[in-house]
Image: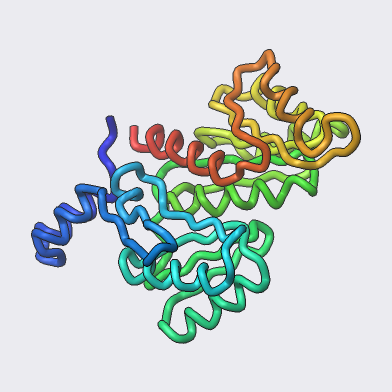
Amino acid sequence: MPSNHRVEEVLSGFKEGRLTLKDAVDEIVGLRIEIIGNLANLDMGRSARCGVPEVMLAEGKSPSQVAEIARKAVRASGRIIVSRISSEHLDAVRTLCQDEGFLLSIHEDAAMAVISTGPSPELGSGVVAIITAGTSDIRVAEEARVIAGEMGCRVKTAYDVGAAGIHRLFPALKECLGAHVYIVAAGREGTLPAVVAGLVDCPVIGVPVSTGYGYMGQGRAALASMLQSCSVIAVVNIDAGFVAGAFAAQIANMVGER
């Protein structure tokens, strides 16, 4: 199994004297939990343990809850990603960052924000391509893009190249050459991932998007179509941009290291 970049960083930090033995052990063990009252138990060791960053789902939480969780997470680990963030959540997060001196990066199309005390992770050699069938699928694709980038991948995108105008796909695939894995987001009948998988020699992850209406609308037809694909693809849940982005990054990072 390829080595974990985070573990390498921790060991280098200890060797060079930037980390104490206790700090290095805490990071490597990957079992750090930050308890926030009765509100949340933050898994601060996930990045070291699994290579996937800590992501907080803002949906269903009040602005004050999001701000408090983010405060503790950034103080403990230096970084947290917030997904499905609303304008009210953003107001609370902006105030938090002003008060604490945290850095704030807002990704409006993805409805995400990254709160941190330092720069973005260094880019590695893994390359992820993200393709959407339509413009309405971009919101989910952007969520995948942010996560893949936060996991150190280089990301190429090609949006609105769906099967309704299939001639748009071929120039897009040319722009995505060199990718180690493809994420293909599509709503309605969800055709595009199977088409792409029949044209490329890399893993393809299909993401059904909750567009479409009437019978089997809201992504259900797209999900069923992808699950029945005769092309070889993996399929995540409806609108699961985070899962697709993290899964693709794990693949790309493993391949890129070879």
Residue at figure coordinates x 33%, y 71% from the top left: 75
Judge from the rendering whether residue 35 lies leftward or rightward of residue 61; answer left or right.
left
Residue at figure coordinates x 79%, y 39% from the top left: 218
Residue at figure coordinates x 45%, y 37% from the top left: 252
Residue 111, image x, y percentages: 64, 60
Examine the rendering and report whether any part of residue 168 can be seen: no
Residue 60, image x, y percentages: 60, 59
Q: Residue furthest front?
A: 38
Examine the rendering and report whether any part of residue 242 can be seen: yes
* Quarter of the figure that contains the N terminus: top left
* Quarter of the figure that contains the C terminus: top left
> In this rendering, is residue 61 above or below 223?
below
Q: Residue furthest bottom?
A: 99
> In this rendering, is residue 1 above or below 20?
above
Among the 4 quarters of the image, the one containing residue 187: top right
Residue 55, image x, y percentages: 47, 55
Scheme of colours in the image: rainbow
Among the 4 quarters of the image, the one containing residue 33: bottom left
Report the number of discs. 0
> In this rendering, is residue 210 above or below 16?
above
Judge from the rendering whether residue 8 lies leftward or rightward of residue 99; answer left or right.
left
Judge from the rendering whether residue 3 lies leftward or rightward of residue 127; answer left or right.
left
Q: Residue furthest right?
A: 214
Residue at figure coordinates x 37%, y 69% from the top left: 72
Q: Nearer the viewer, residue 172 or 146?
A: 146
Among the 4 quarters of the image, the one containing residue 226: top right
Residue 29, image x, y percentages: 20, 47
